[in-house]
Image: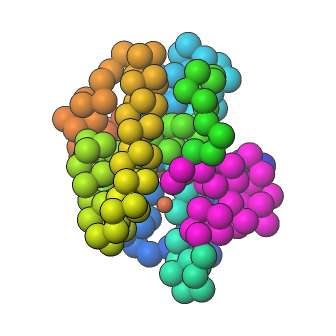
Amino acid sequence: MIPSIKECYRYMDKYHMLAHIKAHSVVVARVARMIARGLREENPDISVSKTTVGALLHDIGKTPSINFGGDHAEIGKQICMENGFDEIAPIVAEHVILKNYRLNSADSEKEVVFYADKRVNHDRIVTLKERENYIIKRYGRGQEELGERIKINFRLCGQVEEKLFSKLNFSPESFLEMNGAEIERFERGLEIPGAH
Ligand SMILES: [Fe+2]
């Protein structure tokens, strides 16, 4: 089952998603939805609703992981499974790191959410490089090995970017110009809770 956008907002509350994570998730969902819509023109197998919902719920495991420990992507996957969102669970599970990924495989909702999450710092659309620098500073904890793993993940994300945008008629940079009102106009129905 794929929940509606309205239901996603209810689940955010049910799992005590913090306001800034909600705001982040909505911007990720806007970016992801635009990419999915673009890809769909060529590939009808891409589901815009699956992508949007996957993006809205990608950090649903964040608060439980802060409170009780554990990997937030894995917890998020479990939450999706418990609520019958089986099609969304794999997207949430792999939003941080894509598992068994092949660059030459067909485009997927998973890839879109993985990518879109790395284009949004807090609720601001940024370049992959900017997000990478933030993640290294925030989570690398000065450990060289961890920092290296983050860099490898972002290198892959750069390849995903190249692959996805080779099929789109807008560029990765165009999101930077669309911050704020413009993207909101494109993506009606994805409002940041509490912002209006
Ligand atoms: Fe996350």
The residue nearer to you, when weighing 113 against 20, is 113
**Is residue 9 at all visible to an observer of this figure?**
no
What stretch of residues is rendered in magenta? 71-97
Q: Nearer the viewer, residue 65 or 141?
A: 141
Q: Quadrant of residue 135?
A: bottom left
- Residue 73 showing in the rendered view: yes
Residue name at image x 45 percent, y 23 percent: 163
Q: Residue at x 23, y 49 (%)?
A: 130
159 horizontally vs 41: left or right: left
- Residue 8 point in image, percent of width and height: 59, 59
Residue at the limit of the structure toward the front, as seen here: 145
Residue 84: x, y in percent? 80, 58
Q: Quick one: quadrant of the C terminus? A: bottom left
Left or right: residue 51 compared with residue 184: right
Q: Quadrant of residue 42?
A: top right
**Residue nearest the observer in this picture, 110 or 85:** 110
Image coordinates for residue 120, horizontal then vertical, percent:
33, 51
- Decide whether residue 90 is among the magenta residues: yes
The percent coordinates of residue 10 (x first, y second) are 60, 67
Q: Residue at x 68, y 60 (%)?
A: 77
Q: Quadrant of residue 166?
A: top left
At horizontal 56% and vertical 77% (from top left) the residue drawn is 65
Q: How is the image coloured?
A: rainbow
Q: Is residue 9 above or below residue 141?
A: above
Does residue 72 show up magenta in the picture? Answer: yes
Query: Which residue ends up furthest to the top in the rendered image?
Result: 42
Which residue, as the protein is rendered here, is positioned at the far left?
Answer: 177
Disc count in the image?
A: 0
Question: Between 59 and 50, which is closer to the camera in this rendering?
Answer: 59
